[in-house]
Amino acid sequence: MSGKRPNIVYIITDQQRYDTINALGFSHMDTPNLDRLVREGCAFTRCYAAGLSCAPARASIFTGYFPHTTGILKNACTWRHSWLEDLGEAGYHNVNIGKMHTWPLNTPCGFHERYNVENKDRYLEGRYYLDEWDRALAANGLVKQQREFYRQRDDYKQRLGAFEWELPERLHSDMFVGDMAQWWLRTYPKTEPLFLQVGFPGPHPPYDPTARYAEPYMQKELPIDAVLPEDLEGLPPPLREYRRHCTEVDHDSVVHQLDPDAHARFRQRAYYLANMTMIDDKVGEIMQTLESQGYLDNTIVVFTSDHGDCLGDHGLSQKWSSYEQIVRVPTIVWGPGIVKAGHRVDAYCQQFDISQALLELAGVEVPGSFESITALPALRGEPWEGRSYVFAEQSGDPSLTHANMVTMVRSKDWKLTHFSGEDFGQLFDLNNDPGEVRNLWDETNSASIKREMRDVLLEWRVASQYHTSEWMRDHR
């Protein structure tokens, strides 16, 4: 590694499942550029989001604190500050291109430049917020495909959010963000040290690849879990209500079906995965542009997502639950001379453990109140135990309408999801039930492990409140 502080390029997708990268064992995927990052970098195979939806998860990544500490427990909670401010004070030039999901949407949050592209289909918070993508479409005399238009289709409810992108391909949100990142790198004078965040809106719904990307996936055999009776029987009341709610409210142009036909589920999955291949192509182009502009000799590239998507698994739509499809996120760190190549880390970690390592590599003092543990030894290929437990949180919101506070804790062997103030929950034996089908919450034989996991949850919250008390006092 050179004596210079490394440039950091942080690429984050929206709602990408962990099982969407070929080189990580999922052969149905076409992801040659992400495969390259896996081969030449460090892949964390057990990395967990701290939130069950966008803003809580992202705020934790960029602050170093769990959602209950930041107070960002759902989307549209005020989020104005991040450790990017510390990077800026240390001399980094911080640029955001694409989605960050701060609130307000255009708050600086430590960036010197922001080129916002937010949700593909904004309908609740910030519905009339016009971003860079809206302006680009308008400059071409176009309006983006969105919910009002999709609703006019006779088959709207049967599409499960899967629609072909019919406007020019270059104006698809993910193509636009990828191209804008390249434009910035080619146009702005070379700036080091640089922190560049690239936020792809996909594969978040609407699931909208162009036909040339969708067609190959429609010809594939795709692994899709059946929804078993035990899945539905074990859903806690808030998730049962969420399942029903999603059939009546078309969040992000998705109208959920309680019993969708096999073709509809297949098309939804195929379009979602095709959107990932679109993003993969743009990641490859960004890497080429970084190289042509002279950045790659001293750059760390991070690739991850904020959370995943059930895509009908467990009978559920999108996120807001704590199944592995949601909380386990793909995470790759690449950096020749800095990160050990071809290294896989199976230890359990939170996403902000990697954030701390980035700050250390940038020469920034890490606040003692951070709730992260450094993943720097793992990046270097040194022994690293990671965490015994990982956690994720979410409050009730306009989608999760019948819950107050939801908290997940998982160990290597067990996962517990706690609903505050309620006597129901979820408990899964991950050794014997890795698919999280049989909820053991009410099983007498599981009472002791349920008590043990709840004790872990309680101790974590108490220790967290004490550890972060000064930071919380100063940030009121």
Image: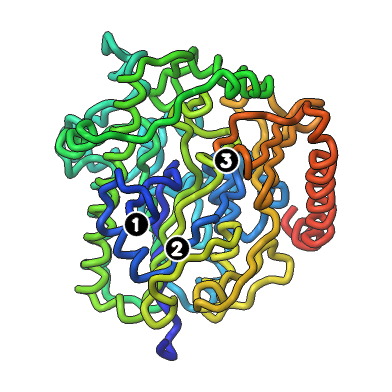
The image quadrant of residue 222 is top left
Judging depth in this view, the residue of 181 and 467 nearest the camera is 467
Residue matched to label 1: 23
Which amino acid, mark 2?
Answer: Ala
Where residue 434 is drawn, which disc sits there?
3
> Real-space Cα distance between discs 3 and 2?
21 Å
What residue appears at the point 50 percent right and 71 percent down from the top-left corner? Answer: 88
Q: Tell me the element at label 1.
A: helix
Viewer-nearest residue: 15 or 290: 15
Above or below, 282 relative to 373: above
Q: Residue at x 78, y 45 (%)?
A: 453
The CA distance from mark 1 to mark 3 is 21 Å
Q: Residues within 10 Å of mark 2 (few under 14, many from 20)?
A: many
* 14 over 194 or under it: above or below: above
- Disc 2 designates what residue? 43
Question: Visible in this render: residue 131?
Answer: yes
In the rendered image, the quadrant that contains the N terminus is: bottom left
